[in-house]
Amino acid sequence: MSRLLKIQEAFQRFLLGGDPTIGSHVVGTQRVPVETRLGIYGNGYRLRLIEALQKSFPVLAQLLDEKFEALAASYVEAHESTFFNIRWYGDRMAEFLAADAEYSKLPILAEMARWEWAMDAVFDAADAEPIDASAFAGIAPEDWADLQFDWSPAVQVLELEWNVPQLWKAVTEGSDQPEPALEPTAYLIWRRELQIFFRPLGKEEAAAVTFVREGHRGAGRSFGELCVLLCEHLDLDESEATRPERATQAAMASQHAAGFLRGWVESGLLVGVVSQPTED
């Protein structure tokens, strides 16, 4: 191992764990002793990580106010940076809040961290050109059941228990903040160009989006499989249904699926569509 590499590793051990070995490689003066020089770098490293957390969780930081710096310092102490890009530092903040004895008393804080992390992930996701209605123009009716969809990388579905989006919006806009309230809801988050959008999903659409996206990018669920899923969400008991009733149920499921598909296309959530015939 080269001398330079040994010095670099000793410096890293100092930054991450306070190992004093690096001190033998640092020249101090009467005015600026070794401890002071090392302290500048050590403190600077931690402050940079805290600054990264503030940028990733701005609303959480506002909600906690002066307590956020203590939270961030505790997080830095518990989780060293393992990323080449500091943007990804903070990926375990929600988990950290949920496990902390003090912060876990306010579970909305952990959910706020999940929400802000998801928003950043959506913004940083790879670009992809959305399709429009013309992508379906040449598809024969008999091929619709086998259609599979490629979703934009900038799409996420988040299951929340609290009114986090409303609180996030109020803090971001500087308006009156709502009281924390339990509002179990799934939210769809996506980006078009540089603008992020989000909206709540009804139970039926949430199940549809999750189902179709389970194997997207090469092995996605088909439009026909989606229709079968939606049949199961209708109230009619198929075991007791007559043939006309089952036909009506299937037609309703197809209409629901088509409605969801139209909304997904109009919102720019889909970036590809392909017919994949099922093997016999």
Image (cartoon, rainbow, N blue to C red):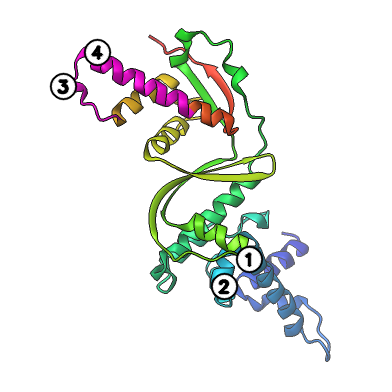
**Residue type highlighted by circle 4:** Pro
Mark toward the viewer: 4 or 1: 4
Classify mark 1: helix, strand or loop: helix
**Residue type highlighted by circle 3:** Glu
Magenta span: chief secondary structure: helix
Q: Which residue is mark 4?
A: 244
Q: Which residue is mark 2?
A: 68
Q: Is residue 163 left or right of residue 72?
A: left
Q: Which residue is mark 3?
A: 240
In the image, what residue occupies the spot 83% across and 87% down? Answer: 29
Residue 206 position in % (x across, y down)? 42, 38
Q: Is residue 181 above or below residue 103?
A: above
Going from N to C along the chain, the mark reached first, 3 or 2, is: 2
Q: Quadrant of residue 39?
A: bottom right
Q: Which residue is mark 1?
A: 54
Mark 3 surroundings: few (<14), some (14-19) or many (≥20) residues within 10 A: few
**Residue type highlighted by circle 1:** Gln
Going from N to C along the chain, the mark reached first, 4 or 1, is: 1
- Report the span colored magenta: 234-260
Going from N to C along the chain, the mark reached first, 2 or 1, is: 1
